[in-house]
Each structure stands twice: as structure tokens, then as C-alpha cells.
Image (cartoon, rainbow, N blue to C red):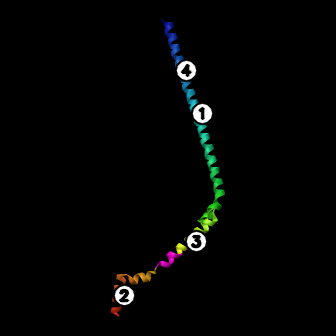
Amino acid sequence: VREYQKIKEFERIQEERSKSQNIQEQRKKILSLKIEENEKIKFIKEQLKEKIKTAKGYGMSELEDLLENPYKDLNTGMNKSMENMINKLSMINSNTRRSPKKRREKSPRKAASVKKKKNAK
């Protein structure tokens, strides 16, 4: 009976050891996967940084040109007609605007105050 107990105890100890070994192996695998993921993320970030740097270096002159001339496009004939239309529209708007003095004189409040001033003199 004692030998049977010793054998059972030995088997139990062996099972615990194997469980702990399995747990340690799983932890090692998880750590290695995390390390690989971190390395991949770092690599991707570096690639993105390089792409951003090259994009900034390449596209800055084009962006500056667009800021200076927003009507610039590949089709120059279309752009010229668009610029002409916009210029005409801006001229129409500027010609039809009245000066602030004329508006004030025609408003009823201004007219009443002008009459009072003339009558006071």
C-alpha cells in the first residue's frame, strides 16, 4: 500500500512539473509573439515615417504652387476660362455694390437725422 502511495505521489509530482513546463513554454511563445509584433509595428512605423518624409519633400513645391494659383490644373484651357469667369463675377460684384455713404443717406434713420441737423442750423 505504501509503495502504491509513493507511486501515485510521484505521478502527481510529474504531472505538476509537466503542467508548469507547459505553462512556461506557453509564456515563452507568447513573449516571442509579442516581441515579433513589436518589431513589426516598429518596422511599419519607420516605413510610414520615411514615406511621410519623402512625400513632404516631393509635394511641397506642388502645394506651394496650388496655394499661389488655386485654379491651376492639368487642363490649362479650362483653367483660363474658369479664371475669366471668376474675374467677370468679381467685377460684377464690385460694380453693383453701393458705397456705404449712399446707403446711409437713403436709410430712414439717416434721413431723419439729416433733416434734424438741417433744421437745427
Q: Amino acid at mark 2?
A: Val
Residue 40 is drawn in which quadrant?
top right
Q: Earlier in the sequence, mark 1 or mark 2?
A: 1
- Does the residue at mark 1 contact the one at mark 4 (Cβ under 8 Å)? no
The disc label shown at residue 18, or none:
4
Q: Secondary structure at mark 2?
A: helix
Task: Find the residue positioned furthest to the top.
Answer: 1
Q: Residues within 10 Å of mark 3 (few under 14, many from 20)?
A: few
Q: How far apart, in angstroms, are the residues tagged by discs 2 and 4? A: 105 Å
> What is the x, y in percent for residue 10?
53, 13
Residue 30, percent from left and from top: 56, 32
Q: Which residue is mark 1?
A: 32
Residues in magenta, as a range: 91-97
Q: Residues within 10 Å of mark 1 (few under 14, many from 20)?
A: few
**Amino acid on which the number 1 mark rests in the picture:** Ser
Q: Residue 84, labelled with which disc?
A: 3
**Quarter of the image where one finds residue 102:** bottom left
Q: Are marks 2 and 3 in contact (CB under 8 Å)?
A: no
At label 4, which amino acid type do we have? Ser
Residue 114 - label = 2
User: What is the x, y in percent for residue 47?
Assistant: 64, 47
Please tell me which residue lies in front, 4 or 51.
51
Say which label, 2 or 3, has the lower sequence index. 3
